[in-house]
Amino acid sequence: MENYINSNIEERAAEGRLSSFGKVYHITRTSQVKKWLWGTLLLMLVILCLPWTQNIRARGSVTTLRQEQRPQELNTIIAGRVIKWFVKEGDYVKEGDTLLQLGEVKIEYLDPQLLDRTQEQISAKKNSIENYRNKAATAETQRTALLQGKDLKLSSIDNKLGQQQLKIMSDSTDLVAVTNELAVYKRQIDAAKLMYDSGSISLTELEKRRMNFQNAQAKRITAQNKFLQAKQEMTNLLIEKNSVEQEYRDKISKAEGERFASLSNAASTEAELSKLQNLYANYDARNQLYYLRAPQSGQVIQARKAGIGEMVKEGEMIVQIVPDKVQYAVEMYVDPMDLPLVSIGQKVRFVFDGFPAIVFSGWPQNSYGTFGGTVAAVETEVSKNGKFRALVVEDSTDKPWPKQLRIGGGANAIALLKDVRIYYELWRNINGFPPEYYRSTTETKQKDASK
């Protein structure tokens, strides 16, 4: 044992047959730790000085920017029962293609000749309106004839009144003449009495004058009666004129009443006709609703009704149609803290589910399998998940999105921010500072243009 302790181990190991000592101990070799340490430190310094693109990540799904390009439910407006299916799930249809035929279930629409019967009612109402209008025209003609007859009758009475007025004037003149003559005979008989009393004339002369006086009195009475009779006839003509006016007024009023009644009936019938025409249009539109047609081209999915004869309710969904021409977009949800960093026109990189990708979040230009996008809209109201929804469309300056995308597919979004050094990004993350805010190129150009 002492020999081994006092001997030179290296010399004895070199003379011995065992080689393990030489493999374990490397005392004679130079250490490389210092070089590796300095090299690692230098490499880390170089890496820390490399550029790094700040970003925020968000999870989203594939959708479309326009509402009419999203999956659309096809609902039935009327209740009915399934008569025939013209398509099956998965079929591609064009706009206007017939998908389903429904049958009527309501009692008031079961008549197969409902449209024809309604059309007959419309024709009858039209004839009734025409008859009422003809009756009103006849009443108007009758009214015109009555007005003309009234004018002729009144003209005749006015002529008689004129003639009677002349007759009254003539009788009045005769009465004045007879009265004057009577006054003359009165003076003569008074003078004859005096002369008879004095004996100047004979009794025969007196009687002769007395007879002339009596004849004059008789003429006066006759003339007075004729005058009064003429005035009475004048009064009778005036009464007749008023009677004629009243009679024709009643007849004209009756004719006008019939005319207005006919026009009123025509108007009421026109209102009924409008209701029938509206009803006919509704029946015709309902007949067209028995056939459900595709509102746009796309694929038929999720048929809710299967068997023939199944009942459907008003407003119930029948199938869904996924449009074949879609402008894809991605809806991503951003945390409230990152919302100020997202603006319209900002660049975003996507990794779509099902498409291989190699992602370097800090070096987007060196990533493989990512696709570019541009923020098109940012909602101002928080969603149910507590985040804000942003819509991103395809970047026209980048490579196109894959054609195999489908609505509802997943997408990982990387919103690109400011370019910084790696050491700054590490220092920012250690201190918990938010990423550097910057304005997108589009927003900056818009502000410069507004100035």
Image (cartoon, rainbow, N blue to C red):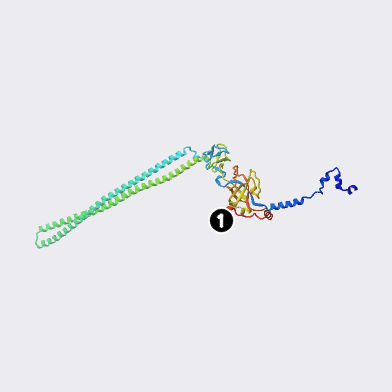
Task: Check the image and name the residue furthest to the right.
Answer: 2
- Of 161 and 296, the residue lying toward us: 296
- Residue 441 screen position, x and y as percent: 59, 53
- Residue 349 screen position, x and y as percent: 62, 48
- Of 163 and 316, the residue lying toward us: 316
**With 92 as the anchor, is 225 left or right in this view?**
left
Residue drawn where x is 71% and y is 52% of the image: 44
- Residue 348 screen position, x and y as percent: 61, 49
- Residue 408 screen position, x and y as percent: 60, 44
Q: Give the secondary structure at mark 1.
A: helix
**With 245 as the anchor, is 300 left or right in this view?**
right
Residue drawn where x is 15% and y is 59% of the image: 184
- Of 237 and 195, the residue lying toward us: 237
- Count neighbours of disc 1 (C-alpha within 10 A) and say few if under 14, some if 14 to 19, many if 20 or more: few
Is residue 281 visible to us here? yes
Is residue 105 visible to us here? no
**With 249 as the anchor, is 32 left or right in this view?**
right
- Of 348 and 291, the residue lying toward us: 348
The residue pinned by badge 1 equals 448
Disc 1 marks which amino acid?
Asp
Residue drawn where x is 38% and y is 43% of the image: 130
Which quadrant of the rendered structure holds the C terminus? bottom right
